Image: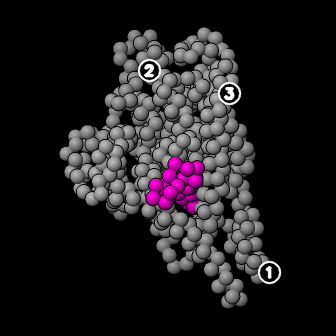
Amino acid sequence: MPNTINNKRLIQNTMGFIHIVWQVVLFGAPLYFLGLLSFKHYNMGLPDASLTINNYQLLFTDSLFYKAILNTFALGIIVSVISTFLALIAVISAFNLKQKTIRNTLLYACAVVFFIGLIPRTFVFQYLLSDQGPFSASWHLAGLKTFPFRLYTFAGVVMGYLPVFVPLSIIILFIARKEVPRNYIQAAKELGAGNRNIQFDIVIPLIKSSLLISLVLVFLLTIADVIVIDLIGGSRIYSVSSLIIDYIKIDDWGMAAAVSFVFLFSVLLFLYLISKIILKKKGE
Amino acid sequence: MKWANYIPLLFILFLVLCPILFMGVFSFSDNRFITLPVASYSTKWYNTVINNPELVGSLLLTLFTGISVAILSVTLGFMSGYWLVHARSINKQLVLALFTIPAIVPFILYALGFLEFTRHIGIARTKLATIIGHTVIFSPLATVYFYHQISRLNPDLEHAARELGASELKIITEIVAGQILKNIFVCMVVVFALSWDEYIISWFVSGFQKTYAVQVRNMLESTFSPEVFAVGTITGLISLLVLTVSFRFSRREIVS
């Protein structure tokens, strides 16, 4: 029997060990190389032999970098809040309906949409938001002046992200909403609670952690995106991803790595501060 | 007050579905330029896709990459998930959080470091590099998924099998994996779909053997062609088919 237990432990630990080694080598080492690269100065596409902090000095005096960081975080926050809010409305509305078919169709549609190629989808949306597109035409037809969500504007980029991330938020909140015990809602109804009370006092508190997951996930995916910001924002809406790609296009890998490294720490710091605020509020 | 529930639902469904519906319509347009209403319809862009060897090659490469990434990620995720469930004297939540870091770091940052790393180990701009890169970022999702699935299983079944003399390999493959076979399939589909659409790592490391996402992006950067809509519709229909099959598998768990 002790042999069996030892054998069991050995196999289980080996299974875990393989993935840990995999992650340390194939995730840790690239990050190390990224850090190293950020201290290399590139001249005509070739790195100097010595390490320098020139890239960081240049970066911190570059107003475009601050603009890119601000734009990226603003986009991340706004898109994650709007996506989660719209998804919450969709999920609450779907669960208020008696027909399960509609509810299931919503989940199915979101799952399918989420896995259909992002680039062709965004390209279609680029046309829909353009001055020749149907949205702008309908806006003008209604007698309104400038279409607020047109291409190459901040609002347009936010709009461009919604069809991409609302389905993801819906999937997350849908699964959480399904976990809410029916008898809680039934009991509240029998005690005379209205729909508004049920949603605000029972459902939303119970799916709070999923709301948080949706906010964080959409935030992370938005700040890392390079497709929507490029196709809908063009060169007018500048993000950190655009800055990194621009440096790569001129073969300045050192600056690209420096931007990446500072950005990585900014993201981790931001998430740390957010988690601190949330934990502090929970403590209160 | 039924309408009060239908209106936001319809609006959100429209927002989510309109790019796909328009993509389908434009893919059948006879005109090279996008206009509404569509003047005449044809299937010529579908013929162009089928006769474009570069595009077909990239689709096949992405299929191969996606399947490899799905198998690797699910294997690694299952192994680490199983280990985490059974591990003693470690902070499981902390280890799980550490496992998920690759999935939350912006992919562009990882891609840049990964390209430099692959240059040093001599696999830069190869299929293998794309497969490894995707597996690193998507396997953590499989770990989290399998950790939750395996922790829900009844541990007595494993004990009973062990008492009856089953080998550890048999317990893992037949007792544990056997009970979550459906979940393994669903996880493979999800990872495959994520790998299929991944752009930035592929853009950095795939080199001349471009994946579907990189190929489509390049097509849009040079001269615009409605081929992009045709290929988007084709892949959309394939995704629809694959997801329908996987939904059938997991239906009882997700949908009541």
Q: Nearer the viewer, residue B98 or A22?
A: A22
- Whether the magenta-drawn stretch holds residue A245 is answered as no
Q: Which residue is mark 2?
A: A130
The magenta segment: B118-145
Q: Which one is closest to the eye, mark 3 or mark 2? A: 3
Q: Which mark is residue B164?
A: 1
Q: Within 10 angstroms of label 3, few (less than 14), some, or many (20 or more) residues?
A: few
Mark closer to the chain start, 1 or 3: 3
Instruction: Give, as a three-letter code, the residue at label 1.
Output: Leu
Q: Nearer the viewer, residue B39 or A183?
A: B39
> What is the chain letter for disc 3?
B
Q: Which one is closest to the eye, mark 1 or mark 3? A: 3
Instruction: Give, as a three-letter code, the residue at label 2.
Output: Ser
Q: Which residue is mark 3?
A: B51
Instruction: Give, as a three-letter code, the residue at label 3.
Output: Asn
How far, Cα to Cα, is label 1 from label 2?
Answer: 68 Å
Q: Nearer the viewer, residue B221 or A107?
A: B221
Question: Residue B153 location, x and y as percent?
Answer: 68, 67
> What is the chain letter for disc 2?
A
Residue located at (35% from left, 27% from top):
A153
Q: Which one is closest to the eye, mark 1 or mark 2? A: 2
Left or right of B196? Residue A65 is: left
Residue located at (69% from left, 88% from top):
A3
Question: Residue A146 location, x and y as percent?
Answer: 35, 17
